[in-house]
């Protein structure tokens, strides 16, 4: 087994055995209520893993400083796309990125998380 295959194996094992079980409606609510700090240990672990395992890098652009925030994404090739999603607060935009990362993570590691209630 190559180093890359071994690393992918461990990443998948950690994702399925340690990270996915932590993701719940309560965890998502915790992030929505406090998207910048004061994380529980579980939320901190999920965020750390999510930020290192997605192929798309989402970020926030202040399209009208202190008034409007827009999401953008950079793919693995470095291409940047401004998304057609606008938010009235940086906190809302940050939580939207969290939801996108959760959905991408669950798709990648085999769990469907498209329930309407998890916004």
Image (cartoon, grey):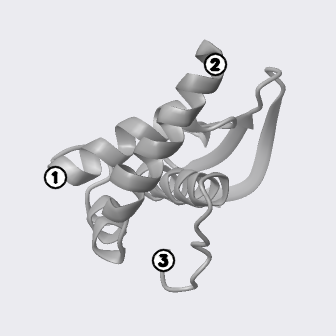
Against 70, is 59 above or below?
Answer: above
Q: Nearer the viewer, residue 87 or 79?
A: 79
**Farthest top residue in view:** 3
Q: Is residue 39 visible?
A: no
- On the image, the x and y values in percent for residue 118 come to 48, 77
Q: Nearer the viewer, mark 2 or mark 3?
A: 2
Against 27, is 102 above or below?
Answer: above
- On the image, the x and y values in percent for residue 27 come to 30, 65
Q: Nearer the viewer, residue 42 or 71?
A: 42
Mark 2 burial class by Cα count in 10 Å: few <14, some 14-19, many 20+: few
Name the secondary structure under disc 3: loop
Name the secondary structure under disc 1: loop
> In which quadrant is the N terminus drawn?
top right
Q: Quadrant of residue 87?
A: bottom right
**Mark on residue 40?**
1
Q: Which residue is mark 2?
A: 4
Q: Going from the N terminus, do you reach mark 2 or mark 3 first?
A: 2
Q: Going from the N terminus, do you reach mark 1 or mark 2 first?
A: 2
Q: Which residue is mark 3?
A: 118
- On the image, the x and y values in percent for residue 10 come to 48, 33
Against 60, is 85 above or below?
Answer: below
**Mark on residue 69?**
none
**Farthest front residue in view:** 1
How far apart are the alpha carbons under marks 2 and 3?
A: 33 Å
How far apart are the alpha carbons under marks 3 and 1?
A: 19 Å
- On the image, the x and y values in percent for residue 45 come to 29, 43
Q: Is residue 24 visible?
A: yes
Mark 1 burial class by Cα count in 10 Å: few <14, some 14-19, many 20+: few
Question: Which residue is rendered at x = 69% and y = 37% of the image?
Answer: 56
Q: Nearer the viewer, mark 1 or mark 2?
A: 2
Question: Which residue is rendered at x = 61% and y = 38% of the image?
Answer: 54
Name the secondary structure under disc 2: helix
């Amino acid at each position: 087994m190559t180093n890359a295959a071994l690393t992918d194996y461990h990443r998948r094992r950690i994702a399925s055995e340690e990270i996915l079980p932590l993701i719940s409606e309560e965890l998502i609510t915790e992030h929505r209520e406090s998207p910048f700090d004061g994380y529980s240990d579980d939320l901190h672990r999920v965020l750390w893993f999510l930020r290192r395992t997605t192929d798309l890098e989402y970020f926030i652009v202040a399209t009208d400083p202190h008034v409007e925030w827009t999401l953008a994404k950079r793919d693995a090739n470095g291409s940047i796309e401004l998304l057609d999603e606008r938010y009235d607060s940086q906190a809302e935009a940050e939580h939207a990125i969290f939801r996108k990362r959760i959905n991408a993570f669950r798709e990648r590691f085999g769990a469907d998380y498209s329930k309407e209630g998890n916004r």
